[in-house]
Image: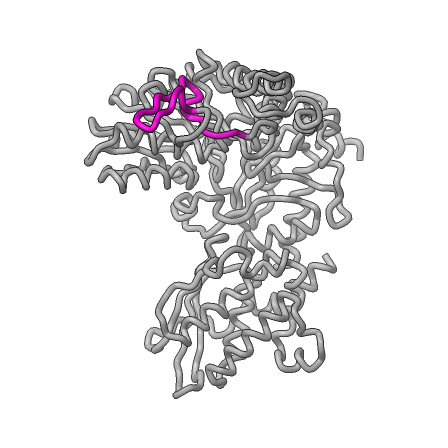
Amino acid sequence: MSTAVRETAAANPVYDVAAIRRDFPILSLRVYGKPLVYLDNAASAQKPQSVIDAEREVYERCYANIHRGVHYLSVHATDAYDASREKTRAFLNAAEAHEIVFVRGTTEAVNLVAQTWGRANVRAGDEILITALEHHSNIVPWQMLCEEKGARLAVAPITDSGEVDLAALERLLTPRTRMVSIAHLSNALGTVLPVARIAELAHAAGALVFVDGAQAAPRMPVDVRALGADFYAFSSHKIYGPSGVGVLYGRSELLEAMPPYQGGGDMIRSVTFEKTTYNSLPYKFEAGTPNIAGGIAFGAALDYVTRIGLDRIGAHEHDLLAYATQTLSSIPELTIVGTAREKAGVLSFVLAGVHPHDIGTVLDREGIAIRTGHHCAQPVMDRFGLAATARASFGLYNTRDEVDALAAGIRTVLKMFR
Amino acid sequence: MSELRDLYQEVILDHSKRPRNFRSMPEAERRAEGYNPLCGDRETVFVDMDGDVVRDVSFQGAGCAISTASASMMTESVKGRTRAEAESLFERFHDLIVGKGGESPDESSKLGKLAVFSGVREYPVRVKCATLPWHTLKAALAQNGATVSTESEGPNAESGGA
């Protein structure tokens, strides 16, 4: 019996996961009388006490509108909000804090670039290049831009294992390619993309690079300058912070040259009815009162993951993914979708004869939360001839025991539908 | 597991594994396609009418156990009925699975075998799975040729109040 226990625990735990779990109040919840097994982190991650406290403390101690008031509270709220911007700069290793634009989330970041940089720089006949494993949010904004401009959306194919076909991508780069927009980590398949290599190819062809880092930022260290990303976006809610806050990083000279996004307060320097001059970076892109408390609590989330270390979080999740891949592979009816050589955090699968929705419902009653469906990546599903998959995705607090619970749950599913 | 059996009753599992009338009817005069954008499920319902009466009805497509069983049992239930009878059966079925009435023996007897779907009311996110075939049938009967979507009725149209 002790052997079984020893086998389940990681040989060399990266950190004390039990201690980490105590930081997340929701993880002690029981659902349908069973301990919660939360494996839907790619959709959204749970929040540590420090983030919950940070948001509450804003409202209890330092809330007022920012960048406006001369009074005590406004000054303190502004300082705290701007501190989050500096933390984000350090997190991404960006050169300047003003290269960090706060938005609602990754989706808004893509739309912002498509609607401002795109509107100013993309002409009829130009091309935007994406890959076949993108989330809808990294497809549709570019599609809208292409439609408006008479430009073309080119799509680099993926292989049967779910890797981007780099040779094909290279062939699709043309003198008309203006932007290459790619995920850093696929939300549907778990594939890690060779961003630095793709950026080299794109830059050599004279194109810019936008990186959707929604899934990567919570799971691996990100250095936008080492990657060669001209733009990089991610969301607070997937990195243990509040929802409704996201980040757009853009190189200074690109952001400077881009027209503003939305018009309104805070994004202007002066307004008359004849002429408005716009504010400096990043405020030019931040019209209106933002999610103040959320932005400050997002800083607490960055503090939290930075304290643990993104390399250690990555190593922990790598162990879970390897263990889950091995454990689930022993179930004959189960097929893993997405078998790229480099993967992180995400395990998509199908069961012969059982629809993913039915898997999800049965697992739910076992207290296990996974995602089922097309994961906002319908072209990926089409590529594999599937309508949907079941997806387990890991966070820094998940354990090998939870992977065992998932495997047991899948056996319950099979028993029911056999 | 025992609670799940309220949803996945033996009759439902049987119909999901061996759906009845699961075939294409290329000659059918009426057909419609149903689509659930949340899960990507698609199915086509074929209807052959004899005047106002459903002479034959069949379906094809891929879906979860609930939607496949619902489609299968629907085809058995509406064959030989008038369009009005089929639509009124859908209304009762809908009330049953969103938990509006349907509890009385009277209602259950009108629904016949379809009463096995009463467990769906405990699973509001699965209501759309059960109603997709019926929405599709309704569109086929109305012969408007449109693709019906579970999302076409506005926010929470079929959320069953949850």
Q: Residue shown at 54%/34% (left/top)?
A: A244
Pick whichever, A191 or A290, lies toward us.
A290
- A102 is higher (above) or lower (below) than A374: above
**What is the quadrant of residue A368 in the picture?**
top right
Residue numbers of the magenta segment = A267-290
Q: Residue A415, image x and y in percent? A: 66, 56
What quarter of the picture does the C terminus of chain A occupy? bottom right
User: Is residue A229 a member of the stretch shown in magenta?
Assistant: no
Pick whichever, A95 or B110, lies toward us.
A95
* Residue found at the very far top of the displayed protein: A95
Question: How many callouts does the rendering have?
Answer: 0
**What is the quadrant of residue A325 in the picture?**
top right
Q: Residue A278, image x and y in percent? A: 37, 21
- A24 is higher (above) or lower (below) than A304: below
Which coloring applies here?
A: one colour
Pick whichever, A322 or A237, lies toward us.
A237
Q: Residue A290, image x and y in percent? A: 52, 29
* Residue found at the very far front of the displayed protein: A273
